[in-house]
Image (spheres, rainbow, N blue to C red):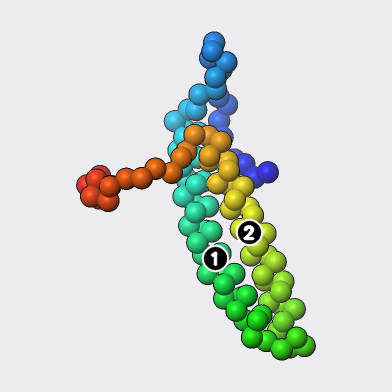
Amino acid sequence: MFQPPCRSPRPRYSSGVERLTKADQACAVAAAALAHDFNNELTVILSSVSSAIATLEPGHPARPALLDLEGSARRCAQKCGNTLAFSLRHGIRPARAALAAVLEL
């Protein structure tokens, strides 16, 4: 499973609960943001490739290359999912926010 290289060792506390350092939190937030943005781009790529494959004749010379591209994009989407899972394991959770409050930051 993918784990970004910016992880730092986490101290253990007497309760046995692991706590994130600020560096870990920042890394998890960055990983989630990058994975989310990259996944959005992959959605466009997969949609376009799937549409192109559907419109081509079965024996068209571009079809094998498009099928390879589709497979690669699906593997990248899986890696995005792994990266999002990494960030979720580290306490980063999506939350609703009022747009006005976010824009005032």
Residue 98 in view of the camera: yes
Taking depth in this image into account, of 30 and 51 the one nearest to the observer is 51
Q: Residue 32's x, y, as percent?
A: 50, 47
Q: Which residue is mark 1?
A: 43
Residue at 57 percent of width and 72 percent of height? 47
Q: Secondary structure at mark 2?
A: helix
Amino acid on which the number 2 mark rests in the picture:
Cys
Quadrant occupied by the C terminus:
top left
Taking 93 as reference, is 37 above or below it?
below
Count of labels shown? Answer: 2
Check residue 76 in the rendering and tell me which mark sits there, or answer none: 2
Location of residue 51 by image quarter: bottom right
Residue 96 placement, left or right of 10: left
Residue at 56 percent of width and 64 percent of height? 42
Label 1: few (<14), some or many (≥20) within 10 Å?
some
Amino acid on which the number 1 mark rests in the picture:
Thr
Q: Residue 11's x, y, as percent?
A: 55, 20
